[in-house]
Structure formats: structure tokens, C-alpha cells
């Protein structure tokens, strides 16, 4: 539990950032790591609550045993800490960087607005484990003779591949892009997570016997039916990549783009790859010397803001149709659940102008080229308020209002009429499978991650990949020792 009186004696501290004026000049991570003694002091604040809500399901989707590894860090036992952390989370260096940390919202100390710095400690454990050489391949000692194909190498596909490989199966991962990682690599900007962390895990997994087939678009280059014939099990982890339709007039103007092609392109530039990409437009999209408007209030929109600043945008405005949330939540009403309150991302803090309770009415332009975004204020029911129209100057606009499901030009197109799909009330298309067996309506085909549950967090994808791996192992072998 750390130090018994630690939460009384030690103030909450988290890793600091480089100044905005410095960090917008590069695409590298800008978090300044804390020293080991500082991290240990933060771990010492853990109270070992009678009911640790940080575990989950309210706090952590993968059920990290947070009080346990906080205590191990406090006692300078980094090797046992990473072993404990890996028992529930295959990739803590990913989640320690990009997870919004619902565990901290659920921390008992958050009742006093000073939760344990769980995310900071988690990242420190993973980084320290690499530094000390504790993260090495763990190949299976017994091989089952079973072959498993995984479609997609995002966090769900990678987690499932590692679990199944360690269970002794011959695992083959098929990835549409030129490198593994899915939207971890191509959707999340490098300033939030540099991609060498993915590369290190891929090398570890190769050492455990996992085979990666990149540049293979399943459903086009190789048929799903062929995989089903060649493998004992196939797991579909295609993600949720189709942008949600905005229904805003003027989206055909030059200068109006969905968010993801923009982020994918920049990640490919940083990775020194060709920006051409299967499924995404390949014309260069750059924000240098432009007035930029981002429609949407979530993480993807924030990533567009930070990317635009780094490309040299003159001005970035972010539009959110939701009301401006309160600075503080009512703890007794919402704790330990995720609260709606005013949050400012690192990208927004770099100088974005944020407009709340504003609807985007139309993209306006001249001669087919974007010149502005017409907006208006809305009431509490998101209905336009008469007489509040205004136009924001814009040379470039990004639509970042979420995703409606996987691409339908490959796997779903091939399996049309055979695979049971669900369309939810927002129009999102998900593959039907429960969260116990993860089996689809097609024999030998399982599914996990955003393609099943809809767009969600990296940590949820890791959970689903791990659980689907257990379900597949049990189906193939009759029993399993893999954890849920």
C-alpha cells in the first residue's frame, strides 16, 4: 500500500511538460520524466483502500492491481512491479502514455482532488523495466500445433497475439499498413507516444514466435475464407476507422477533411514512410500558415489541434457542440465514475481557441475552396439559437466527431450476408459477439476490440484482445490457463 501515512505527508505530483513554445517545434514526446525517488514518493501515497475502485470496472478496464504495484515501487522492487503490471496489461508503456486514466478518477483521494498519480507510476514502471532489461521475449515451452490468424495489429490484435503465442500457438498477424500497430502507430501522434515503443514490443513478440505479415489487406490481398481454411482460428481486430458522417453542407470544398487521414499522414511523415495509405486519401494535408478549424471536442480533435500547431498553423479554433462543463464535478453524485468537468489537453493548452455550445452549420468557400466555417450558438437541446450566426475564417477544417465502425471495403465486404452485424442508435456498425466467447456468427471466426464494441480506449482494446485470446485458447484446447 506504499507508506501508511503517505497520502497525508506527500503532495500529488505528476510529470511536467516542456513549455508549449518549445514543444510545438517538434513531434517528439515532451513529458519530462520524474526521477525514481519522486516516482516512489508518489507511489507511497496509495492508501490500499478497503475497496480499491481504481481496479475496475469503474476504474481500470484491464483490472490493474494498482495498490500492489504501488507498494512494490515504494519498496524499490521494480522487477516484481513490472511482473505484477504485466499480469493484467501487456503494454503498460502504451497505456501509461495515452490512457485518460479513469483509475485516477476512481481513486479515493480524488474525493479531495488529489488522486494518486497512477498513470505516471505505471509509465515509470514500464520505462524502468526496459532500462533494467526486465522485458524480454517469453517464448512458449510447449507448442500446441494449432495455428491462429489475427486480422489487425492494433492494441487488441497485439494483445491477443502475445497471449496466444505464449500459450504455445503458432500466431500470424495480418496488417494492412506497412508496419504493425494499427491506429496506435498511425492515429496517435508521436508527441503523445513515440513509435519506438511499439517497435520494441513487436521485436519481443517476434522473439516469442509471433509472425507479422504487413502490407496485406485481408479481404482484398488475401481472402478471409482462405484464412479460415488455413488456420484453426481467426480473430478479427479491424478497429473502428470509418469517420462518422457529419451531415454538414460544404464538406466537398477543398480544405475540408476528416481528421484521421490528416493524423495518419503526419505520423507517416514522422516515421519516414510514404503518405499513401490504403483506405485514406493521399493528397498532402498541411496546416502551415493557415487558419484551422477543428469540429469536435474529443481526443481525435485534440490531436488535430496539436498537429496543426506543430505544422505552423496561424490560428486553431476548436468547436464543441456541448456546453462548457463545470470546473469541478459534484463528487458525491459521480465518484468513482468518470466525471464531466472542464479538462484541457496538452494540445489545447498550446493556444487553441475553444468554442463551446456551438453548432457547425456550413463550410463556406469561393471557387470550390474553403474560406470559412459558418456557426451558431445552440440551446441545451442543441437547437440553433436564432440570430447568433457567425463565420470563422478558415483555410483548413477537420471533422473529428468519431467513428462509425470498421472499413467496409475489405473484410466486411467479403463477408457481407454471412457475418452478423449490429447498427446502434448512432448508426455505428459493429460485429456481433459477446464479451465472454467473442465468437462471431461464422465458424472459427472471433472478433475483439473496437470492431466489436465500437470506438473506445486503447486500454479497452487490450482487455478485449486478452479476453478473446483466452476464449480462443479454451476453444482450441478444451481448457486454458490464460487470464480473463
Image (cartoon, grey):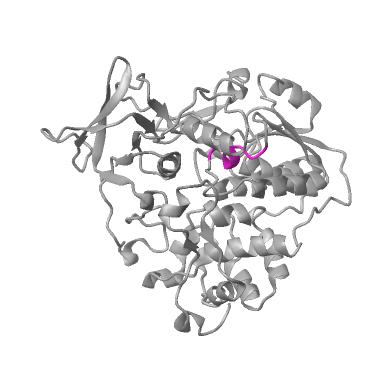
| Residue 467 location (% of width, % of height) | 65, 47
Q: Which residues are magenta?
A: 180-187
Foreground residue, 420 or 150?
A: 150
| Residue 468 location (% of width, % of height) | 66, 43
Residue 66 appears in view = yes
Residue shown at the point (59%, 48%) measured from the top left: 194
| Residue 19 location (% of width, % of height) | 43, 58
Foreground residue, 319 or 379?
A: 319
Foreground residue, 172 or 302?
A: 302
Question: In the figure, 18 relative to 220: above or below?
Answer: below
Residue 470 appears in view = no
Question: In the figure, 231 relative to 190: above or below?
Answer: above
Residue 246 is drawn in which quadrant?
top left
Residue 210 is drawn in which quadrant?
top right
Tell whether position 74 is magenta. Answer: no
| Residue 63 location (% of width, % of height) | 58, 59
Residue 97 is drawn in which quadrant?
bottom right
Residue shown at the point (44%, 33%) measured from the top left: 259
In the picture as drawn, the residue positioned furthest to the top comes out as 367
Tell whether position 186 is magenta. Answer: yes
Amino acid at each position: 500500500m506504499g507508506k501508511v501515512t503517505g497520502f497525508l505527508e506527500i503532495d500529488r505530483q505528476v510529470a511536467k511538460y516542456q513549455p508549449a513554445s518549445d514543444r510545438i517545434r517538434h513531434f517528439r514526446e515532451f513529458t519530462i520524466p520524474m526521477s525514481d525517488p519522486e516516482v516512489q514518493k508518489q507511489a507511497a501515497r496509495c492508501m490500499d483502500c478497503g475497496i480499491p475502485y481504481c481496479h475496475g470496472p469503474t476504474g481500470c478496464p484491464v483490472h490493474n492491481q494498482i495498490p500492489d504495484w504501488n507498494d512494490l515501487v515504494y519498496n524499490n522492487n521494480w522487477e516484481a512491479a513490472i511482473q505484477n503490471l504485466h499480469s493484467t496489461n501487456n503494454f503498460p508503456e502504451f497505456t501509461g502514455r495515452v490512457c485518460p486514466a479513469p483509475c485516477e478518477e476512481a481513486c479515493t483521494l480524488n474525493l479531495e482532488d488529489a488522486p494518486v498519480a497512477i498513470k505516471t507510476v505505471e509509465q515509470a514502471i514500464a520505462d524502468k523495466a526496459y532500462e533494467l532489461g526486465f522485458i524480454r521475449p517469453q517464448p512458449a515451452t510447449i507448442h500446441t500445433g494449432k495455428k491462429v490468424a489475427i486480422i489487425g495489429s492494433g492494441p487488441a490484435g497485439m494483445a491477443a497475439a502475445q497471449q496466444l503465442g505464449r500459450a504455445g500457438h503458432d500466431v500470424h498477424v495480418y496488417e494492412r499498413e506497412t508496419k504493425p500497430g494499427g491506429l496506435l502507430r498511425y492515429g496517435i501522434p508521436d508527441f503523445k507516444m513515440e513509435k519506438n515503443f511499439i517497435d520494441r514490443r513487436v521485436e519481443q513478440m517476434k522473439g516469442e514466435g509471433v509472425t507479422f505479415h504487413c502490407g496485406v489487406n485481408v479481404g482484398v490481398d488475401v481472402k478471409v475464407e482462405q484464412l479460415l481454411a488455413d488456420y484453426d482460428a481467426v480473430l478479427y481486430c479491424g478497429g473502428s476507422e470509418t469517420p462518422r458522417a457529419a451531415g454538414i453542407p460544404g464538406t466537398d470544398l477543398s480544405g475540408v477533411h476528416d481528421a484521421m487521414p490528416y493524423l495518419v499522414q503526419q505520423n507517416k511523415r514522422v516515421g519516414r514512410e510514404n503518405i499513401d495509405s490504403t483506405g485514406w486519401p493521399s493528397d498532402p494535408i498541411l496546416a502551415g500558415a493557415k487558419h484551422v478549424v477543428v469540429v469536435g471536442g474529443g481526443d481525435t480533435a485534440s490531436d488535430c489541434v496539436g498537429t496543426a500547431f506543430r505544422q505552423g498553423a496561424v490560428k486553431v479554433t476548436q468547436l464543441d457542440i456541448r456546453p462548457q462543463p463545470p470546473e469541478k464535478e459534484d463528487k458525491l453524485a459521480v465518484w468513482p465514475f468518470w466525471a464531466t468537468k472542464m479538462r484541457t489537453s496538452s494540445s489545447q493548452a498550446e493556444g487553441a481557441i475553444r468554442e463551446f455550445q456551438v453548432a457547425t452549420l456550413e463550410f463556406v468557400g469561393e471557387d470550390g475552396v474553403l474560406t470559412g466555417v459558418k456557426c451558431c450558438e445552440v440551446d441545451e437541446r442543441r437547437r440553433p439559437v436564432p440570430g447568433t450566426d457567425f463565420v470563422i475564417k478558415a483555410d483548413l477544417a477537420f471533422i473529428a466527431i468519431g467513428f462509425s465502425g470498421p472499413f467496409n471495403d475489405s473484410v466486411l465486404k467479403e463477408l457481407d450476408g454471412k457475418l452478423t452485424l449490429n447498427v446502434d442508435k448512432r448508426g455505428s456498425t459493429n460485429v456481433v459477439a459477446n464479451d465472454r466467447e467473442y465468437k462471431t456468427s461464422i465458424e472459427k471466426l472471433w472478433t475483439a476490440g473496437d470492431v466489436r464494441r465500437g470506438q473506445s480506449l486503447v486500454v479497452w482494446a487490450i482487455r478485449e484482445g486478452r479476453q478473446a485470446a483466452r476464449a480462443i485458447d479454451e476453444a482450441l484446447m478444451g481448457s486454458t490457463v490464460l487470464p480473463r
